[in-house]
Amino acid sequence: MSKQTLKIQNLKTIIFVLTIFLLGLSQIASAQGQDQNAPTYDYSYTDSTSNTQSSDSSATDSVISDTENSIVAYKRIVLNFDSITNLITYNGVVEQEDSGSDSLYARAKKFGEKIFGKDNNIFEVQKYGQKLVMNGSINAYSYANKYNKKSIGKYEFKLIVLIKEGRYKYSITNLVHRGPIPANGKPFRNYFEYYYNSTTNIRGNDIILRYADREIKDTIARFQTSMKEPKLVDEDEW
């Protein structure tokens, strides 16, 4: 075999080794992902690591979205606000044609003394046959179920009664939740507007307003019943 033949064979061997080496480098580069800044970057290429991170990000976004949706989905109680005072107010006008203003005044005052007590501080305004303003309070409860309730303090408010012949208007406003009296210190006092507009503890505050709504509407029903004239029984009907 000539020297020229040996040189050609050695050259082929070197070229073959170099080719294998370059192919190996190419595979290693592909395994490590592509450089987006490289001129030959393939924009259709998908990196498995990138997919995992994107999937984790999507899962996190989904959890956040579900949390936000649960807050948005919760419907808070809707209460009436007085357009002048901008305070939560329960009010109504009752037509009672068979009642005079003096009779309505006496019944409203009797109701206040019976429910709120006979303390002189109860009646803030007393205009005979026209107007009564009472500082009232009723017990506040939380309800675990229909038969189980727990005291959570009192609801304080003003009961305003405007009286005319054969009709009256009532308003319950300036509503405050006074907490139970602690062993040491003073009980907390929160206005209903605070509970209604608060952006923290939304459910907890809303539940208190729902409990209060139940007690206040029950008080209004009792007030309206007490304002009615007694039914006269015909002596011939027995």
Image: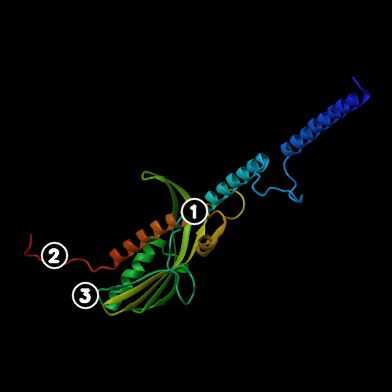
Residue nearest the viewer, comparing 12 with 80: 12
Q: Amino acid at mark 2?
A: Val
Left or right of residue 110, residue 17 in this image: right
Give the quarter of the image for residue 81: bottom left
Residue 210: horizontal and vertical position, in percent? 43, 56
Residue drawn at x 72%, y 41% is 33
Q: Which residue is mark 3?
A: 98
Residue 75: horizontal and vertical position, in percent? 45, 57
- Does the residue at mark 1 contact the one at mark 3 (Cβ under 8 Å)? no
Residue drawn at x 72%, y 36% is 31
Upstream in sequence: badge 1 or badge 2: 1
Residue 157: horizontal and vertical position, in percent? 46, 65
**Structure colour scheme:** rainbow
Q: Amino acid at mark 3?
A: Asp
Q: Which residue is mark 1?
A: 153
CA separation in Å, label 2 and label 3: 16 Å
With respect to residue 26, does 110 lie above or below?
A: below
**Mark 3 surroundings within 10 Å by alpha-carbon count, few (fewer than 14), some (14 through 19), many (20 or more):** few
Q: Which residue is mark 2?
A: 233
Upstream in sequence: badge 1 or badge 3: 3
Left or right of residue 216, residue 15 in this image: right
CA separation in Å, label 1 and label 3: 39 Å
Left or right of residue 42, residue 58 in this image: left
